[in-house]
Amino acid sequence: MHNSTAILVLGMPRSGTSAVTRVLNLHGAVLSENLLPAADANPKGFFESADALAIHERLLSSLGRSWFDIGEMPDGWVDFSETQQAHRELEALIKRDYRGETIWIVKEPRMCRFLPLWLRVLEGLCISPKAVLVTRHPDEVVNSIATMVGDGQWSADHTKTLWLEYFFEAEKASRQIPRALITYDHLLTDWEAHVNRIAAELEIVWPNSSDSIRSEVDLYLNSENRHHDYSLSYDEGRGEFSFAEKTYMICHEMKEGYWTALEAMNSSFSAMLAFFHRPMHDLVHKVAEHYSNIALAQKIQFDELSNESKNALQAKQFELDELKVKNDSLQIAQQVQLEDLRRHNESVCLSHQAELDELKGYYNALQLSQESELSKQHDLIGMQEAELSRLKRELAELEITTDKLFADMSALQAREESAHQILLETQASYAELKRLTRQKAWLIRTFLSRIVKNE
C-alpha cells in the first residue's frame, strides 16, 4: 500500500477526538465503513472504527488490562504472542478498509496506548503515519466522563491521571513521526486556521478545501458539541494550577518550543508514576490477596450451595421425569383424540361439501330459470314498450284529428248560426211577402171585380 498516508487521531475518550475526526473526514480523509453507531453519549456519531475497538479490547483483556487502568503497559508487550495476533488482525483491517486510499484516518482512544503496535503495522505495509494529538481541558473531560460512566464510578483524580497517561503515552510514541497538536477549544474557536496548520505541519494537502466544506463543518460544530466549559484564566483564590492544567495550558497556548515543554512534562509524569509504582504495586497485591481469601471463602460457600443445589436439582429432575412421563401419556391421548376429531371433521366436511354441491346445483338451476323468466319479461317489456309507442302515436294522431274536428265543428256551428239567421230573415221576408201577397190578392180581386162590373 505505497503512497498511502494514515492519519492517527490520538486522544483520551471525551477529549473531542470524534469532532476532530469528523472535520478532517469532511476535508477528504477517508473513514472506515464499519463505524460505531451513534449513542446518547455522542448522538452525532463517534466516527470510530468498530473493528479497531474490538481488536484493542481483545488485546487489553489478554494483557489483563482495561481502557481505564492507570499504569504503563507491561514491559515488552509489543512482542507478546497476543500482540502478534492483534498485529495480524490490524493488518487485515487496514487492507480491507483502506486499500487504494491515498489519505485515510482512524480514531480509537486506545490507540494512545497501542501506538507502537500501530506504527509497526503501518511500517510493514509501507504506509506513511501522521499523528494528530487531540486534548481538552481536564476538568471538562472529568465531567464528560462522569456523565458517560455515571457519577461516583471513579474519582476526578483518577480521570485526570488517566487523561495524562493517555496523552503522554501518545506523545512519547509519536516523537519519531510527523505530528500535530490541536485542542478542543482550538477546533471550536477557529477550526479553519488550525486544520490548515495541521496540514502544513503534517505536510499533506487536504482533498477538500476548507472553503468547499465550510457550511458542513459549521453545521456540525455547533454549541451542542460542548456541554462543559472551563476557563483557563488564573484565579488567585484557587491557588496553583494542577499538573494536568499546566499540561493543557502548554497544549492550548502552543508557545515556541511547546513540544520540548511537553516532553519535559512527560518525564516528570513518568517520574511521579515510577515513585508511586512500588507502593501502589504492593497495595494492589495486598488488596488482591485479601480479595483472594474472600474469593476462597466464597468458593467454599459456593461449593456447599452447589452440592445442596445439585441434590435439589436431582430431586427436581426426578419430579420432572415423572411429569415428562405423564406429559407423554397425555400427549398420546390427546393425539388419539385429535385424530378422532380430525376424522370426524373430515366426515362433517364431506357431508357439508355434498350439501353445498346440492345447493350449488339448485342455485344454478334456479339461476337459469330466473334468467329465462327474466329474458321473457324483457321480451314482454319490449313488446309492451312497442305497443305503448304505437298507442302513443295513435293518441297523437287522434289528438290531431280531434283538434281538426273541433275546428270543423266550430266552423259548422258558425255556418249553422249564419244559416239560422238567414232562415229567420227568410221567414220574416216570407211573412212579409205573404202579407203583401194577401194584399195583392185583394187588390186583384177588387180590380177584377170592378172590371167585371164595368163590362
Image: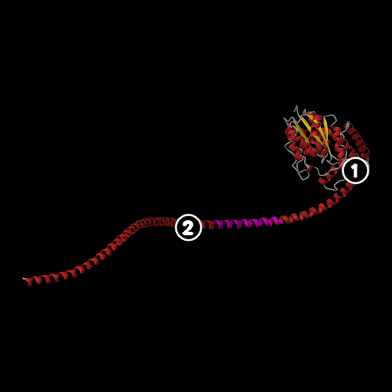
Range of residues picked out in magenta = 322-346
Name above or below for residue 24 compared with residue 383.
Answer: above
Report the disc number at residue 284: 1
- Rendered residue at 78%/55% (across/down): 312
> Is residue 81 among what the camera can see?
no
Q: Amino acid at mark 1?
A: Val
Q: Amino acid at mark 2?
A: Leu
Q: Quadrant of residue 407?
A: bottom left
Frontmost residue, 266 versus 262: 262
- Looking at the rendered image, the quarter that the N terminus falls into is top right
Frontmost residue, 277 versus 321: 277
- Rendered residue at 77%/54% (across/down): 313
For label 1, the SS is helix
- Rendered residue at 80%/53% (across/down): 309
Q: Is residue 329 magenta?
A: yes
Q: Quadrant of residue 277?
A: top right
Q: Position of residue 91 (x, y in %)?
A: 76, 32
- Colour theme: secondary structure
Using the numbered discs, state the Cα–Cα distance from disc 2 to disc 1 in whole angstroms. 91 Å
Q: Position of residue 50 (x, y in %)?
A: 76, 39
> Is residue 171 among what the camera can see?
yes
Other residues around mark 2 within 10 Å, as few (<14) / some (14–19) / many (≥20): few
Name above or below for residue 339 compared with residue 41.
Answer: below
Q: Position of residue 260 (x, y in %)?
A: 89, 31
